Image (spheres, rainbow, N blue to C red):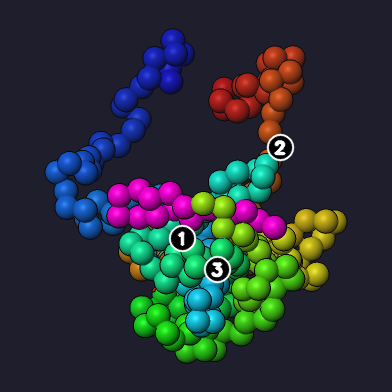
C-alpha cells in the first residue's frame, strides 16, 4: 500500500497463472502440493477387520474442530487407512519425527492390504491408552481417535476423527505443553521435498484495545 492506501503494483514480481480448467488433474495437484506448504504429516495407524495393522502418512491433515476436538485427514482414493477406519471406527494419528525420515517415507509404499507397513519398515507399534488400535512407539505424540464421520469430495474422502485421548512423551512436555524442540516434526512440501523445523519465532497477538490506544504499534507493524 502507498501513503494514500492505494495498492502499489510496482514492488511485486510478475505472476504466473495456473488454471485448473486448463490443466490436467495431476499437473494441477502438483501445483497445489507445492504451494500449500509446509503440511504437517499424520502418521495414521489403523487395523483391518482381520486384525492387520496399517501405517500410512497423510499430509492433507489438520485440526478440524476445537469443541469437540476433531482432526481430519484426506484419503485420495479409497485407501486402506480409510477402509480400516470405517471398518473398526478407530485410528491413531502419530507425529512424524525427523529421526524417522526414511521410515515415514517407506510407510507410504503401496504394500498390499494384508501386509503391515510397520513390520516391513521396522516401525514399532505399542498398545494405545484408550482405543484398540495401536500407536507408534517411536513417535512422541499420539492422538487416539474415534471415527466421527467421513465426507466424500470428488476423488477423495475426508476422514474426521474425534480425539478421545492424546499422549505425549514426558520428555517432550514442559509446563503442561509439548515443546517443538523435542517433537521435531517433519513436514511435506512439493515434489519429493520435505522439511524440518527451522527457526522458531515467537510473537504475541495484538488485542485491538492496545492497537487503538497506542499508535506506535501500527507504525512498528507497518515499518513506518
Ligand atoms: C509424506 C507423505 C504424505 C502423504 N499424504 C497423503 C495424503 O494426504 N493422502 C493420501 O491419500 N495419500 C497420501 N500419501 C500417500 C499414501 O501414504 C500412500 O498412498 C499409502 O500407500 C496409503 O496407504 P494405505 O493404502 O495403507 O492407507 C502420502 C505419502 C507420503 C510419503
Front in this rendered view, residue 40 or 65 = 65
Which circle marks residue 133 in the picture? none
Pick whichever, 198 or 138, lies toward us.
138
What residue is drawn where x is 66% and y is 64%?
144
Q: In the rendering, at what x and y percent does residue 203 appear?
A: 68, 40
Is residue 157 something that shows in the picture?
Answer: yes
User: Along the horizontal axis of the image, is 12 left or right of 198?
Assistant: left
- Give how far apart the Cα atoms at labels 3 and 1 are: 22 Å
Q: Where is residue 2 in the image (x, y as percent from the top left)?
A: 43, 17
Judge by depth and name the residue closer to the eye, 114 or 73. 114
Label 3 CB-ligand 1 distance < 8 A: no
Q: Nearer the viewer, mark 3 or mark 1?
A: 3
The kind of secondary structure element at disc 2 is loop
Judge whether residue 160 is colored magenta: yes
Which is more N-terminal, label 1 or label 3? 1
- Outermost residue, top side: 4
Write down the residue under mark 2.
204
**Contact (Cβ within 8 Å) of mark 3 with mark 2:** no
Residue 213 quadrant: top right
Q: Sequence order check: which comes first, mark 2 or mark 1?
A: 1
Q: In this view, does 99 lie to the left or right of 38?
A: right
Residue 50, given in percent of the width and then of the height, sits at 50, 81
* Residue range (magenta): 150-164
Quote the CA–CA distance across marks 2 and 1: 28 Å
The majority secondary structure of the magenta stretch comes to strand
Rendered residue at 62%/21% (across/down): 219
- Residue that label 3 marks: 88
Q: Is residue 127 above or below residue 58?
A: below
Q: Which residue is drawn at 21% across and 53% down?
A: 25
Q: What residue is pinned by disc 1?
A: 59
Amino acid at each position: 500500500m502507498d501513503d494514500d492506501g492505494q495498492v502499489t503494483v510496482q514492488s511485486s514480481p510478475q505472476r504466473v497463472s495456473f488454471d485448473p480448467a486448463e490443466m490436467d488433474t495431476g499437473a494441477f495437484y502438483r501445483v497445489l502440493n507445492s504451494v500449500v506448504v509446509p503440511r504437517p504429516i499424520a502418521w495414521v495407524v489403523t487395523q483391518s477387520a482381520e486384525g492387520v495393522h496399517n501405517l500410512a502418512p497423510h499430509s492433507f491433515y489438520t485440526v478440524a474442530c476445537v469443541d469437540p476436538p476433531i482432526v481430519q485427514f484426506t484419503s485420495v482414493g479409497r485407501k486402506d487407512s480409510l477402509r480400516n477406519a470405517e471398518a473398526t471406527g478407530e485410528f491413531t494419528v502419530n507425529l512424524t519425527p525427523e529421526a524417522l525420515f526414511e521410515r515415514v517415507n517407506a510407510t507410504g509404499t503401496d504394500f498390499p492390504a494384508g501386509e503391515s507397513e510397520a513390520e516391513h519398515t521396522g516401525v514399532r507399534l505399542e498398545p494405545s491408552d484408550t482405543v484398540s488400535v495401536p500407536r507408534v512407539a517411536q513417535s512422541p505424540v499420539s492422538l487416539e481417535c474415534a471415527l466421527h464421520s467421513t465426507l466424500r469430495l470428488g476423488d477423495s474422502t475426508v476422514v474426521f476423527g474425534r480425539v478421545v485421548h492424546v499422549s505425549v512423551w514426558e520428555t517432550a512436555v514442559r509446563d503442561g505443553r509439548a515443546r517443538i524442540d523435542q517433537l521435531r516434526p517433519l513436514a511435506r512440501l512439493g515434489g519429493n521435498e520435505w522439511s524440518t523445523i527451522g527457526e522458531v519465532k515467537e510473537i504475541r497477538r495484538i488485542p485491538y484495545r492496545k492497537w487503538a490506544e497506542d499508535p506506535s504499534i501500527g507504525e512498528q507493524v507497518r515499518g513506518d
